[in-house]
């Protein structure tokens, strides 16, 4: 259980356990989906590839995982704050519909856009790369792990920043 201290900025190591679990789950799902293939394209030498690529699948994972993980992180962090006497009241009463979903949308747009831009550059510079299904699953799991960690960390930091901004505005 996380301990809440007054206005403590969240750190990346607090997000690692959930990120590793998300990476492992998504890597296993990718392995199950790809294990029958001999070789899997990591990327193709064209924007519109006719088949499935590992980076194409990873884009969907980044989008959905970021949105879901941000919502879950928001609700858990707010619940921890509600149980902690020393947590700021602004954090304990933060609304999910306006703030939580807004954070989920902004995190998703940021991470999905960043990933797609990086994947397009990768595809442009590296072209077609074929890998084994195991390597494709490992890469997909690592991408999921990074997406989950960043979503969790950004959510908690944005929540704390909103508290600090509301206090600065009130002063």
Image (spheres, helix red, strand yellow):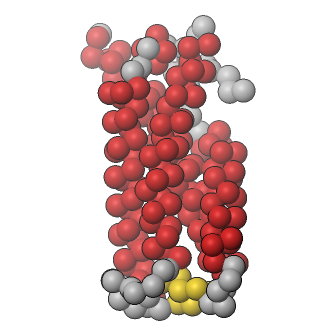
Question: Where's residue 40, x and y in %?
Answer: 58, 85
In percent of width and height, residue 130 lies at 57, 90
Between 171 and 3, the one nearer to me in the picture: 3
Q: Which one is in front, 87 or 134? A: 134
Give the answer, above or below, for where 27 lies relative to 52. Answer: above
Question: Where is the N terminus found, in terms of image quarters?
Answer: top right
Number of marks in the image?
Answer: 0
Query: The C terminus lies in which quarter of the figure?
Result: top left
Residue at image position (45%, 63%) is: 60
Residue 114 position within the rendered picture, expressed as x and y whole percent measured from the top left: 38, 62
Left or right, 4 with respect to 50, comes to: right
Q: Look at the image and tell me whether residue 160 can be seen.
A: yes
Q: Establish if 55 lies above or below 142.
A: below
Please provide percent x and percent y for residue 140. 59, 68
Determine the residue positioned at 44% across, 14% down: 93
Q: Is residue 69 above or below residue 25?
A: above
Q: Quadrant of residue 39?
A: bottom right
The answer to whether any part of residue 125 appears in the image is: no
Kindly indicate the quadrant of the structure image that contains residue 63. Answer: bottom left
User: Closer to the camera, 130 or 11?
Assistant: 130
Identify the residue at image location x=48%, y=80%: 52
Task: Left or right? Give the position of 37 relative to 75.
Answer: right
Who's the residue at 35% across and 69% down the image? 117
**47 horizontally vs 25: left or right:** left
């Amino acid at each position: 259980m996380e301990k809440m201290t007054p206005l403590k900025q969240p750190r990346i190591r607090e997000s690692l356990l959930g990120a590793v679990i998300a990476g492992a789950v998504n890597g296993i799902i990718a392995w199950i989906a790809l294990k029958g293939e001999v070789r899997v394209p990591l990327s193709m030498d064209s924007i519109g590839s006719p088949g499935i690529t590992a980076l194409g699948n990873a884009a969907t994972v980044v989008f959905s995982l970021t949105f879901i993980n941000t919502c879950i992180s928001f609700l858990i962090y707010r619940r921890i704050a509600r149980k902690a006497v020393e947590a700021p009241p602004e954090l304990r009463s933060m609304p999910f519909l306006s703030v939580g979903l807004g954070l989920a949308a902004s995190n998703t747009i940021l991470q999905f856009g960043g990933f797609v831009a990086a994947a397009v550059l990768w595809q442009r510079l590296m072209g077609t790369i074929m890998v084994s299904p195991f390597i494709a699953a490992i890469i997909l799991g690592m991408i999921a792990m990074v997406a989950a960690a960043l979503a969790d960390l950004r959510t908690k930091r944005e929540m704390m920043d909103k508290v600090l901004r509301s206090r600065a505005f009130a002063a």
